[in-house]
Each structure stands twice: as structure tokens, then as C-alpha cells.
Image (cartoon, rainbow, N blue to C red):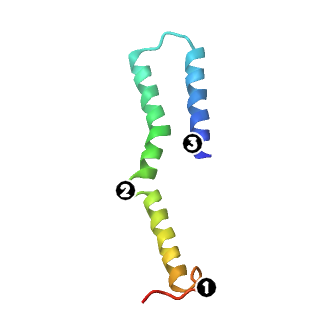
């Protein structure tokens, strides 16, 4: 869902840029690029950073699965290995 929303937002921004066919200074073009980077690219980089939220989510999932396995939630009717 996040990917679709980001993609749609980027397409909207590009469409707006293309329809506003006025002379834009190099400085304004650079500002627009920086804005798009800060708005769309930086948040994605933060998500996949090795110490970012995705890593924390994986660690929490792994912890919960380990806890479930240790407490027999996935091993009902089966013997645990020694």
C-alpha cells in the first residue's frame, strides 16, 4: 500500500511539474529535486536502513516466533528436540 501511495504521489508531482510549463530557474529545479528526495526517497531509506524500523519489526517477529515455539504454540502434538 505504501508503495502505491508513494508512486501515485510521485506521478502527481511530476504531472504538476509538466503542466506548469513555465521557465524555472536552475535554483528552483534544484529545490524541487531536494523536496522530492526529502519527501519520497529519504523515508524509504530510513525504513530499510540496517538499524531502522524494518529491522526492529523483523527482530520483534523473530522474538515472538521463538517465544511461541518455546511455549509449544507451534509444536502441539510433537515432541521438542532435545
Is residue 82 placed above or below 38 in the rendered structure? Answer: below
State the SS at label 2: loop
Residue for point 51% across, 68% down: 61
Quadrant of the image for the C terminus? bottom left
Residue 33 percent location from the top left of the image: 43, 28
C-beta proximity under 8 Å, tags 3 and 2: no
Residue 5 percent location from the top left of the image: 61, 40
C-beta proximity under 8 Å, tags 2 and 1: no
List the residue tagged with mark 3.
Answer: 3
Residue for point 55% across, 20% down: 17
Residue 66 percent location from the top left of the image: 48, 77
Considering only order in the chain, which callout, 2 or 3, is on the residue closer to the N terminus?
A: 3
Task: Report the front residue among 78 and 8.
Answer: 78
Alpha carbon of mark 2 to alpha carbon of mark 1: how far?
35 Å
**Labelled disc at residue 55:** none
List the residue tagged with mark 2.
Answer: 50
Which image quarter: residue 81? bottom left
**Labelled disc at residue 76:** 1
Considering only order in the chain, which callout, 1 or 2, is on the residue closer to the N terminus?
A: 2
Residue for point 43% across, 42% down: 42
State the SS at label 1: loop
Classify mark 1: residues with Cα within 10 Å, few (<14), some (14-19) or many (20+): few
Task: Report the front residue among 64 and 7.
Answer: 64
Is residue 59 placed above or below 1 in the rendered structure? Answer: below
Residue for point 47% across, 45% down: 44
Alpha carbon of mark 1 to alpha carbon of mark 3: how far?
38 Å
State the SS at label 3: helix
Amino acid at each position: 500500500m505504501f508503495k502505491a501511495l508513494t508512486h501515485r504521489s510521485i506521478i502527481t508531482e511530476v504531472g504538476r511539474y509538466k503542466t506548469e510549463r513555465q521557465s524555472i530557474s536552475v535554483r528552483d529545479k534544484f529545490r524541487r529535486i531536494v523536496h522530492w528526495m526529502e519527501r519520497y526517497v529519504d523515508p524509504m531509506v530510513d525504513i530499510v536502513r540496517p538499524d531502522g524500523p524494518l529491522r526492529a519489526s523483523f527482530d520483534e517477529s523473530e522474538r515472538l516466533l521463538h517465544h511461541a515455539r518455546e511455549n509449544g504454540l507451534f509444536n502441539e502434538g510433537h515432541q521438542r528436540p532435545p
